[in-house]
Every structure is written in structure tokens, then in C-alpha cells.
Amino acid sequence: MPVSQLLRPAWLLTHLLVVAAIFVMTGLGIWQLRRLDDRQTENKLIEERMAQPAGALLEVVDLAEPEASVHMTVEASGIFEPGKEVYVANRTRDGRPGVNVVTLFEFDSGALAVDRGFLPRQAYLGGDYRYWATPGDEVIVTGQVRTTRNSRGGIGDEIDVIDLAKLSEHWTVPLLPVYIEAISGATVADYPLGPQLPDLTGGPHLGYAVQWFVFAVIALIGYPLVLTRIARDVRLGVEAT
């Protein structure tokens, strides 16, 4: 195939599309590497906060800036109010569907929502509260700090996420701007199950980055080879005639 034919409008458009695809795939690979870097930075911060010893809730948490204490371990002494309980729906644990049990916790400095952990849906639908009963006396709850999320709605006592503003309205009590994901002190029965460790791996970002770079290299090397083969086939066809 003469070089002049490769400069025709149809071929020029093809060349541009291939070059654009190479740039896009390379950019996606770089973007995934940046996401990996962000995740590693976040994981390091989580590890540092989780490694700190547990402290009294209001000594650890800055209520004006609660995000600064997320993942830190705190303690609070108080009493659970089992009549004020909601269930975060559509949770899973080891492949089992279920809910997370969230109970109001009253202590000296106010009211707090405590995510007591995972309850399999079969036990939840059974309705026997003894399976996830709260301690009846004053207890010390130890757990990790979490912040509120925005709810899109719920049905009855089932909610989609822990929205502290809506829970305050639901329970008619002002809640602190953080809640605790309980590690200990929040149950006297088999359930709820305590939290699992967060995923502190790099996730799939490195694998995705490698895939995009491989695709870019295939296009960069493969397209000239395709053009060379097309030119050879055309030349052989001309010589055969």
C-alpha cells in the first residue's frame, strides 16, 4: 500500500482514533495509579488512628470537627435503651444477609448511637430479642468512631444508613455528631457480631492500571503491524494481477 493511501481522510481518521485510544488508555492507567496512591495514604492514616490506645469519648472526639477522629478507638460508660433501636438493612457477613443493630446509648455527657454489629436476617426475622439483647446495667462500651451519612429513606425501624440527624428525630433525643461501631460491651448474647477489620489492601487499582497500560502497548505496537500486513496483502494482490 503506497504511503499516500495512508494519508487519505478515512485512514487519517483511523490513525487519529487509535492515537486517541492510546492516550485515553494511558491516562486511565495513570488515574488508577493515583487512586492507588490515595488509598495507600488513607490506609496509613487509618492504621495510625487504630493503633492509638482507647480514650474517653469526649477527650478523643472534637465535636466541632468529628471527621478528624474517625477510626479512633473510644470508650463511653452508660446505659442502652433497647426500646430505641433501628436496623441498618441490606448488610452481609460471610455471604449471609442480615442487618446491623443500632441502639441508643445514654451516658453522662449526652446520647449516642451505637452500631452494635451484625445480626443474620434469619435471627432478625425470628423476632426473639434475646438473640441480640443489650446489657441491662451500666456498661463501658469500647468502639471506633464513625460519622453520619445521608439517608435516602427507610421503612419503619429499618434504615439504609446511619443518619444521625434523622435518628435524633426518630428517637426524639439530640445525638452527638458521631456514633460508635462497638467492639466490646454492647451485647450479652450470641449476636450481634462485632465489626470486621477494615480492608487495608491496595484494592484492585494496581491491577486495573496494568491492564490499561497493556492495552495501550498492544495498540501502540499492534496497529503498525496491522498496517504493515495490510500493505503486504495489497502488494501481493497487485503483483498477482
Image (cartoon, rainbow, N blue to C red):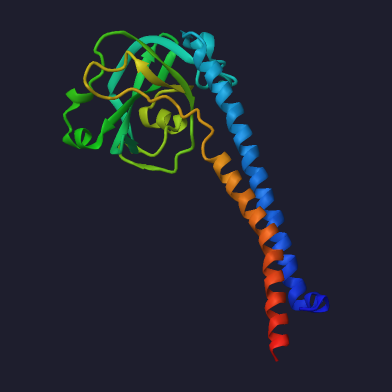
Quadrant showing the C terminus: bottom right
Q: Residue furthest front?
A: 240
Q: Residue furthest bottom?
A: 241
Residue at image location 38% in from the left, 25% down from the top: 196
Viewer-proximal residue among 229 and 118: 229
Quadrant showing the N terminus: bottom right
Residue 97 lies, with reference to residue 117, above or below; the image says: below
| Labels in figure, total | 0
Name which quarter of the figure residue 12 lies in.
bottom right
Residue 114 lies, with reference to residue 142, above or below; the image says: below
Residue 234 percent coordinates (x, y): 70, 81
Answer with left or right where residue 47 lies relative to residue 234. left
Is residue 117 at least partly visible in the picture? yes
Answer with left or right where residue 183 lies relative to residue 187. right
Viewer-proximal residue among 117 and 202: 202
Residue 6 percent coordinates (x, y): 78, 75
Residue at image location 43% in from the left, 33% down from the top: 166
Residue 237 percent coordinates (x, y): 68, 85
Is residue 89 at least partly visible in the picture? no
Viewer-proximal residue among 45 and 101: 45
Residue 145 percent coordinates (x, y): 47, 20
Answer with left or right where residue 92 lies relative to residue 74. left
Residue 21 lies, with reference to residue 125, above or below; the image says: below
Name which quarter of the figure residue 65 lies in.
top right
Viewer-proximal residue among 58 and 131: 131
Residue at image location 66% in from the left, 53% down from the top: 217
